[in-house]
């Protein structure tokens, strides 16, 4: 369905912000105009839930999670990124984390719970939406997960 991604995104982020009792700061950077995309809301909620719960899981106390929506006019894409100040992911593992059941540090990951499926499922869903998903990271400094979605033509009939 056709959705203004900003409102949808805010709702998902707020749900985490309200329910988390750890001391993590949420920082948003959002565009000031509407962003129309065509998404399956349930699937997109699952993707965001996966990425945000990872960010929370790997964040230190007092850490900041950044939520950013950026419009790439040239490529007619929306870029969604979620960054944290957690442990990070080693460079050579940045692609592997999107594989099924892959977890960077088995011992640590076991303590933190999970199956290693979240990002693999997220990639499948973003693929199905015609977008891309990847991770950037500096070990010990944090991780940023970004995905793109094709933008719908926004102001049809609005020629200037
Ligand atoms: P599940 O999502 O199935 O509950 P999971 O979180 O371990 O389990 P993924 O979400 O697929 O699985 O993530 C795969 C692995 O990538 C994680 O086990 C972790 O090692 C690493 N990872 C993912 N997100 C982050 C992050 N924000 N910071 C550090 N490591 C991360
Ligand atoms: Mg996960």
Image (spheres, rainbow, N blue to C red):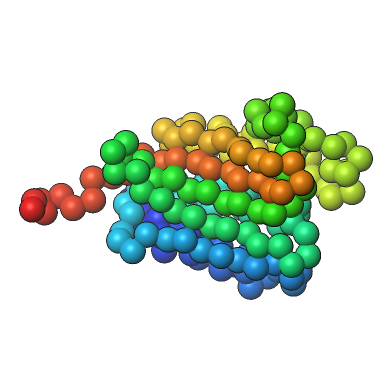
Q: Position of residue 93 (x, y in %)?
A: 72, 29
Q: Position of residue 111 (x, y in %)?
A: 89, 48
Q: Is residue 29 left or right of residue 138?
A: left
In terms of image quadrants, where is residue 60?
bottom right
Task: Tally the marks.
Answer: 0
Q: Please tell me which residue lies in front, 125 or 159.
A: 159
Q: Is residue 156 left or right of residue 117?
A: left
Q: Is residue 94 left or right of residue 140?
A: left
Q: Please determine whether, in this image, residue 24 is positioned above or below residue 154.
A: below
Q: Position of residue 4 (x, y in %)?
A: 35, 57
Residue 54 visible in image? no
Q: Position of residue 88 (x, y in %)?
A: 73, 44
Residue drawn at x 84%, y 50% as measured from the top left: 112
Q: Please tell me which residue lies in front, 25 or 115.
A: 25
Residue drawn at x 88%, y 44% as measured from the top left: 108
Residue drawn at x 39%, y 45% as measured from the top left: 78
């Amino acid at each position: 369905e056709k959705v203004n991604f900003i409102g949808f995104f805010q709702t998902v982020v707020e749900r985490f912000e309200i329910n988390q009792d750890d001391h993590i700061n949420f920082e948003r950077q959002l565009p000031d105009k509407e962003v129309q995309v065509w998404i399956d809301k349930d699937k997109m909620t699952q993707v965001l839930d996966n990425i945000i719960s990872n960010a929370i899981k790997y964040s230190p106390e007092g850490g900041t999670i950044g939520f950013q929506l950026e419009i790439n006019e040239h490529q007619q894409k929306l870029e969604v990124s979620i960054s944290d100040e957690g442990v990070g992911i080693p460079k050579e593992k940045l692609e592997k984390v999107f594989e099924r059941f892959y977890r960077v540090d088995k011992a640590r990951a076991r303590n933190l719970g999970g199956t290693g499926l979240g990002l693999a499922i997220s990639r499948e869903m973003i693929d199905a939406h015609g977008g891309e998903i990847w991770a950037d990271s500096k070990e010990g400094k944090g991780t940023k997960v970004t995905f793109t979605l094709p933008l719908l033509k926004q102001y049809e009939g609005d020629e200037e």
